[in-house]
Amino acid sequence: MDTLIHDLQDITIRRISVSEMDNNVYLLTAKESGAQLLIDAADDLPAIQELLTDAAADTAATPKLELIATTHQHWDHVRALPELVKATGAPTAAGNDDAEALPVPVDRTLEHGDTCAVAGFELTAVHLRGHTPGSIAFVYQDPAGPTHIFSGDSLFPGGVGNTQKDPERFNQLLNDVSERLFEAYPEDTIVHPGHGNPTTLGSERPHLEEWRARGW
């Protein structure tokens, strides 16, 4: 299976789906430096290690996993995190309000607008409150093409993430997604969710008021 989904100017993006929950694991590799950043060590350490091996083809440098970033605290997004940290020694990053719930110490806690930088590229942390208190979307602004958002479980094709039918949490999440993603980034921005297939902001934007009206 080819895990490469985007071959960009400075980085590659690879993806695998793991576990019975169809969790997406994303790996970004800097072509020049070989630095790698993995988003959501969800499950299946051998599959993640195979993903890292695949990505060695994306750089002439020696690849090195420099950061493991977690979008949110839910169990299905962190099951391989302790094993991956043990196997690689890579530091970890997660939203400040979710960090204590992760199964490993978090080396870098993130607030809204913080950046995660490795050699060759950086991601911007966008705090999206509602699915969990500290959910983070990671945004890569490609200098030569569309922006990429790794949205965790906060934004999917067809709606925002699960807020357990809590109107306050739903409104908070929809407001954050509207203001911090849809009002901040262009129509062609690609959204990579925590489960399932990608979409674009332009595809989802016409439905924002429909989502608000239905309440989920």
Image (cartoon, rainbow, N blue to C red):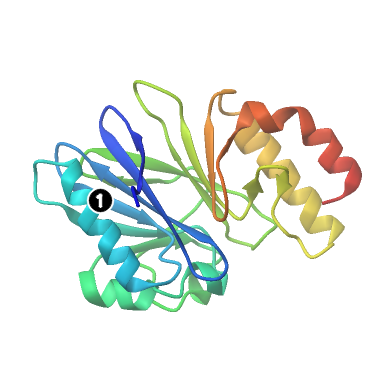
Most foreground residue, 143 or 199: 199
Q: Where is residue 175 in the image (x, y as percent from the top left)?
A: 74, 42
Residue 33 located left or right of residue 150: left
Residue 43: which quarter of the image? bottom left
Extreme-left residue of the structure = 61
Q: Can residue 17 be seen in this view?
A: yes
Residue at 79% in and 53% down: 170
| Image label count | 1
Residue 97: which quarter of the image? bottom right
Extreme-top residue of the structure = 144
Residue at 49% in and 42% down: 113
Could you tell me the amino acid type at mark 1? Gln
Give the secondary structure at mark 1.
strand
Give the answer, above or below, for where 19 lies relative to 66. below
Q: How crowded is mark 1: few (under 14 residues within 10 Å), some or many (20 or more)?
A: many
Give the answer, above or below, for where 38 lies relative to 118. below
Q: Name the residue under label 1.
A: 36
Residue 29 located left or right of residue 198: left
Residue 205: which quarter of the image? top right
Residue 27 located left or right of residue 160: left
Q: Position of residue 119 (x, y in %)?
A: 20, 43
Extreme-right residue of the structure = 213
Residue 211 located left or right of residue 34: right
Q: Position of residue 123 (x, y in %)?
A: 39, 42
Q: Can residue 183 be seen in this view?
A: no
